[in-house]
Image (tube, grey):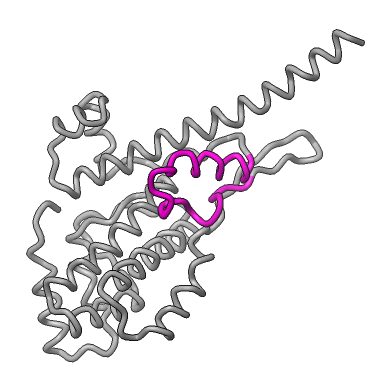
Amino acid sequence: MAVMSDFTTIEQAFEVARRRASIGQYQEARLLRQAVHAAYMAGMSVRETAAKLRVPKSTVARNLRPSLGPLTPPSWGTPEEYMEAEQAIWAHAPERIPAGAPFRWTDADDGGHSVSVVAVGAINRKRIKTEREESPMSSLNNLIVRAQEVGQYAADLAHASEGAPASTVGDAHHPGDDTGRLVLEAYRTYGAEEMLAVVRGYQGGYNARAADLGDYVVRWPEIANGIEWALPGATDEEARAIIEAIKPQPLD
């Protein structure tokens, strides 16, 4: 009996270690991809990025490929352990902690085990709508934050509808009417230069969430090619001005 009791104790420890290692491996791969894309958006070279992250240049280049497939979700874990990892990772930036774990793990009666993706961004949807109704003349910073949240939600929708969204490099990305309204409000209130920060907010939110899910990120030219279909209420003159302001952006 003592031997069996010892096995049970070690088995429980093994299960905890396996879950935490699985989540940790996923988080490392996810954050590496996020860091590489953030460096790209900041204009850093492959060499500079590799040196800063202390990884091979080939690793940086691989994570920038448009053909890069989605990340494999952690095979083992619990929502609580996933959120513990997020809280530890983002202790220095708690605003980046997600509302919940994007995965659910299920053990079947027959001994099977599965993991599924859930849309965390949908939790923020009601808050986005409420903030818009309560504060129609928000500060520029609030517009940027709201654009980030809309971008996160859009990435969730894309993943839920397509599983693993295909790359749209060289094509057009429709940022949605919600984004268009924020962009138009920023343009009317603050001007073209500040309006670009709202578009960047949407792109940043979308790409951070897409990287979380292991999906393709959206490039600036794709947004520039699709923004004209996402400007409800804009006059022809406003639409032309916004499109022209967005198209020449560098480092994309």
Q: Position of residue 96 (x, y in %)?
A: 41, 52
Q: Position of residue 104 (x, y in %)?
A: 62, 47
Q: Residue at x 34, y 59 (%)?
A: 205
The N terminus: image quadrant: top right
Is 107 part of what is drawn in magenta?
Answer: no
Q: Position of residue 126 (x, y in %)?
A: 51, 74
Is 82 part of what is drawn in magenta?
Answer: yes
Does 157 sit left or right of 100 as displayed?
left
Using the image as rendered, state which of residue 93 and residue 235 is in the foreground: 93
* The residue stretch that appears in magenta: 78-104
Q: Position of residue 127 (x, y in %)?
A: 48, 73
Does 162 sit left or right of 67 as displayed?
right
Q: Is residue 154 above or below residue 52?
A: below
Which quadrant holds residue 224? Answer: bottom left
Q: Is residue 144 above or below residue 39?
A: below
Which quadrant holds residue 3? Answer: top right
Does 197 sit left or right of 100 as displayed?
left
Q: Is residue 222 above or below residue 60?
A: below
Considering every residue shown, the one lying at the far top of the view is 3
Using the image as rendered, state which of residue 199 and residue 217 is in the foreground: 199
